């Protein structure tokens, strides 16, 4: 048990240190290349004028780069690789016990983290090079959703065929076997989680929320004796904290698509590996609320003659439009994310 705790916390600290060290190199490149939006958001998803949104999002005036999510998945990848290499070089040392790269626990979440991060990086690059449409340019929403769909399909296939997994655990009920229905469930969850990535809209907001979510799953995986997966989740938290160090207002860079796509897709895999997907809507409640607030706004405007439910969507921007300072929205979201993470973790552990 003590070595398991060390196996989780040492790489986590390592990821934080690596992320901190990586940031000056990254930010120097991003600022030299002017990797920020060149135009403000002009239109909403339904094609209407985005008067409030354009006032809240003025990235082109702030000149704050995107692609900050590289710090997260970059530090995680370097940390995992470093401990794995050290375990090979010194097989009889402590490093052999600290390496947490394993086929059944960390390959798939690491794969989705990297693939999501790389695809998101393409979108970020295009956003910084193009004049925007409603979403600031870059890859279309349809293209991004198709990518997440096929990534989810590949992940579902791996779970169902390679790992022989076709069930989820329902707290206080037990394991529910889904058979082939496991595949569409996985795809639906990964798309839902990805849609919650739009929470990356205020300095410091997404970092704090994702840190709480992955911390919860680190605890759940540890309780299930999935130590490598617990270490992976905790190392992601270390990378997020390094990113958050520089994303606290005023942000040096934004998480943007490369970070949110990496985190949301990897989170889905972690949730299914722990069979704790049933509590994911609780632990990641703020991601889901953020996504549904946008969906509700679109449907309301379409079917209620342009009437809006919120001043502006997503929800965190609604609070900004009501006059809340950005830091108040961020801090209260942090508090709520910790509370929901604790509630979800308790249910997962006792159920």
Image (cartoon, rainbow, N blue to C red):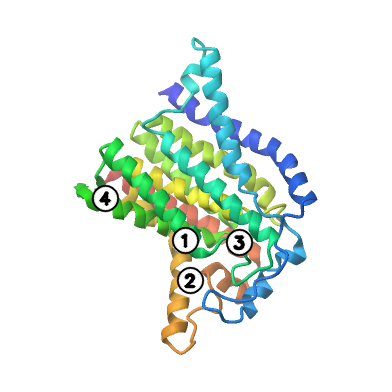
Viewer-closest of 49 and 350: 49
User: Which label number is shown at residue 269?
Assistant: none
Badge 1 element: helix
Mark 4, residue position: 182
Mark 3, residue position: 138
Q: Position of residue 189 (x, y in %)?
A: 37, 55
Mark 2, residue position: 294
> Who comes first in sequence, dot 2 or dot 3?
3
Badge 3 element: loop
Q: Quadrant of the N terminus?
A: top left
Alpha carbon distance from label 1 to label 2: 10 Å
Q: Position of residue 52 (x, y in %)?
A: 63, 78
At x 27%, y 39%, the residue is: 161
Say whether marks 1 and 2 touch (CB < 8 Å): yes
> Who comes first in sequence, dot 3 or dot 1?
3
* Residue farthest to the top, as pictured: 92
């Amino acid at each position: 048990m003590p070595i398991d705790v060390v196996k989780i916390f040492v790489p986590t600290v390592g990821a934080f240190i690596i992320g901190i060290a990586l940031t000056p190199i990254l930010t120097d490149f991003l600022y030299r290349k002017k990797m920020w939006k060149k135009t403000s958001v002009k239109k909403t998803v339904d094609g209407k004028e985005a008067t409030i949104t354009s006032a809240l999002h003025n990235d082109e005036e702030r000149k704050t780069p995107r692609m900050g999510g590289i710090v997260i998945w970059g530090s995680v990848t370097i940390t995992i690789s470093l401990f794995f290499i050290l375990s090979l070089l010194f097989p009889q040392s402590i490093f052999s016990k600290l390496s947490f790269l394993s086929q059944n626990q960390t390959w798939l979440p690491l794969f989705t983290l990297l693939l999501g991060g790389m695809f998101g990086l393409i979108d970020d690059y295009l956003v910084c090079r193009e004049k925007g449409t409603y979403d600031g340019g870059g890859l279309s929403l349809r293209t991004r959703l198709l990518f997440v769909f096929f990534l989810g399909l590949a992940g579902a296939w791996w779970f169902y065929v390679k790992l022989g997994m076709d069930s989820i655990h329902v707290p206080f009920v037990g394991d529910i076997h889904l058979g082939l229905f496991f595949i569409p469930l996985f795809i639906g969850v990964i798309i839902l989680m990805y849609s919650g990535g739009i929470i990356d809209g205020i300095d410091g907001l997404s970092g704090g929320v994702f840190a709480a979510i992955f911390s919860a799953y680190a605890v759940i995986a540890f309780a299930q004796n999935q130590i490598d997966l617990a270490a992976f989740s905790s190392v992601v938290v270390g990378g997020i904290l390094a990113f958050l160090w520089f994303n606290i207002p005023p942000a040096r860079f934004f998480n943007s698509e490369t970070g949110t796509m990496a985190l949301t897709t990897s989170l889905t895999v972690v949730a299914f590996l722990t069979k704790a997907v049933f509590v994911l809507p609780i632990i990641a409640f703020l991601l889901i609320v953020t996504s549904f607030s946008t969906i509700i706004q679109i449907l309301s405007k379409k079917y209620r003659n342009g009437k809006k439910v919120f001043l502006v969507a997503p929800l965190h921007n609604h609070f900004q439009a009501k006059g809340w300072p950005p830091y108040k929205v961020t801090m209260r979201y942090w508090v709520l994310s910790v509370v929901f993470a604790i509630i979800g973790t308790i249910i997962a552990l006792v159920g």
